[in-house]
Image (cartoon, coloured by chain):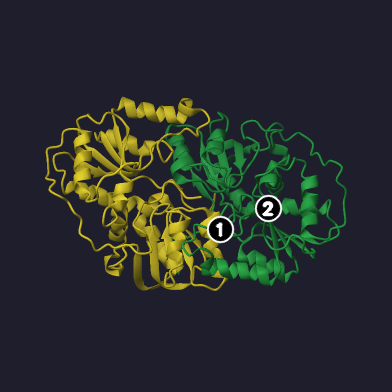
Chain colours: A yellow, B green
Amino acid sequence: MKIAITAVMISVLGSSATGQTTQGSAKTKKIVTANDVIDQIKAHVGVPWQEPTVDTFKAGDPQSPVKGIAVTMMTTLDVLKRAAANGQNLVITHEPTFFDHLDNPKQLPQGEDDAVLKQKREFVAEHHLVIWRFHDYWHRRNPDGIEEGNVHALGWEKYQDPANQYMFTIPETTVAKLAEESRVKLHAAVPRIAGDREMKITRVAFSPGSAGFHRETGALEMPDVQVLIAGETHEWETVEYVTDAHTEGRAKALILLGHIASEQAGMEECARWLRTFITSVPIEFVPTADMWAAPLSSDEKR
Amino acid sequence: MKIAITAVMISVLGSSATGQTTQGSAKTKKIVTANDVIDQIKAHVGVPWQEPTVDTFKAGDPQSPVKGIAVTMMTTLDVLKRAAANGQNLVITHEPTFFDHLDNPKQLPQGEDDAVLKQKREFVAEHHLVIWRFHDYWHRRNPDGIEEGNVHALGWEKYQDPANQYMFTIPETTVAKLAEESRVKLHAAVPRIAGDREMKITRVAFSPGSAGFHRETGALEMPDVQVLIAGETHEWETVEYVTDAHTEGRAKALILLGHIASEQAGMEECARWLRTFITSVPIEFVPTADMWAAPLSSDEKR
């Protein structure tokens, strides 16, 4: 039942955000090809690179000369179109391009003949795009680059635990107000709340993406954690668990922001980070549109 | 990446809802124990019972005399409390009780010492509840009992394909209006839409629960299907797929109702079905509260 696309983060239960990033002796080098960019990322991320990882090229020729770099949360076709229109031929994405954690959409009944997949692959080929995924090692970096971006976007640096970057003590608020703050600052189209939305809280765990039942309940098992913010999770696992905790009278609630909203700021952070050591090609953050339209309201006129 | 808790349904691509349910020679018998009830279900469901299946006892003594039967979508503690208060000691649930598809919450960091789990198990034991799951075979029945309940709640019998119970041709409407109709009739707290909410549609596939990428894209690959209604699904799979299909100019959209709202009516149907052959003990449908509170609105005063 473990979710394959987990945010590969340092354990919520006892991670440290205090270590210094080891940048080794890597120096800013002239960037020529996509491979050069990735080599620079590997040299600067501060964590030894090991296989297997999903952080690999997904499309295009790694030897292509790079004209511009687009950094994004999820390479939807909409993102690829905007990158191509901007002249960015290297796209660095946190999430899959081809609807599968390994970018191998073998579960599609029509396989490579699937019309949606085919048209997306054709667009990539016609525009000579090179796509590389930056998921595992952007999380494994210290601090986790995704969480760093979330903290920056929320303005929560002063509330963050020195010993655990995923834990926060914030000024007293309610679950609903916290969801609203997250909605606005992280651009979540449809946040959802399980538990008591009027509960007063100060202690928050933020687990970006889809970290799975083990990590999510690991945070909720901590006696002081009152609310967990996450991206998406299975209703028959973490959501039932937090709902039961609430019924048992425990001070526990869950806010799901949606996968994109819960990690997008972390890729904006990634673009900023890349600019610190790649200066010879333009780098732009291309936001992925939240795939959920505005929430329905029964008062809405249609 | 396959989701374990799939709605084990006859393939969306070519199922038949026209076959007659084979009830064999089972006759209404005096019900004494929980085991007797389950034996009657197996005799009436019309599909040969085979292992492995998740349709097993999850708690309590199958030899317990049954005073009353509660039928529910998901055995949250809230549901169990209402069943116990009503004097119903056999609870038949579609979804897990212990936060795991196999009701073995081994992913909990604290395992059986987890306080939430422990208190739930204690409640079950103290009230001598017997819990049995009815998932695989309620879907495998012909017609799929979950889908039958959804069709009943929506009033869509006249729109249903004779050759495929998951497919519907409805009077022209928009994606947003369809989502609103589903929200009201199926009691979905927070439906979400991917794709163009103003798109006009007539052709709908309804895949209850969490059937996974393969089945969901199998429906979306059908040229005439314009909108897929489902419970929950991964954003990096089906949601990215439908978003790209929309960007490619295809008439495809997705409505996610939430897992409970997408299957709850199917367990109300189950209670009605049980009453046709179990008459010696009272049977009640105990609705599971949708775990998502009302959607947030930026206009809302707090």
Q: Residue at x 31, y 63 (%)?
A: A165
Tell me if A103 is positioned left or right of B28 in this view.
left
Secondary element under disc 1, as helix, strand or loop, is loop
Instruction: Mark 2 or mark 1: name the one nearer the start of the chain.
Output: 2
Tell me if B185 is positioned left or right of A124 in this view.
right
Q: Nearer the viewer, residue B126 or B84?
A: B126
Asked if A276 appears above or below A218 in the picture, the reply is above
Alpha-carbon span between mark 2 and mark 1 = 15 Å
Determine the chain carrying the residue at label 1.
Answer: B
Q: Nearer the viewer, residue B34 or A74?
A: B34
**Horizontal and vertical percent position of residue A143:** 27, 57
Q: Residue at x 54, y 68 (%)?
A: B116
Determine the chain carrying the residue at label 2.
Answer: B
Tell me if A38 is positioned left or right of A78 in this view.
left
Q: Residue at x 72, y 35 (%)?
A: B17
**Horizontal and vertical percent position of residue B176:** 54, 46
Q: Amino acid at mark 2?
A: Thr
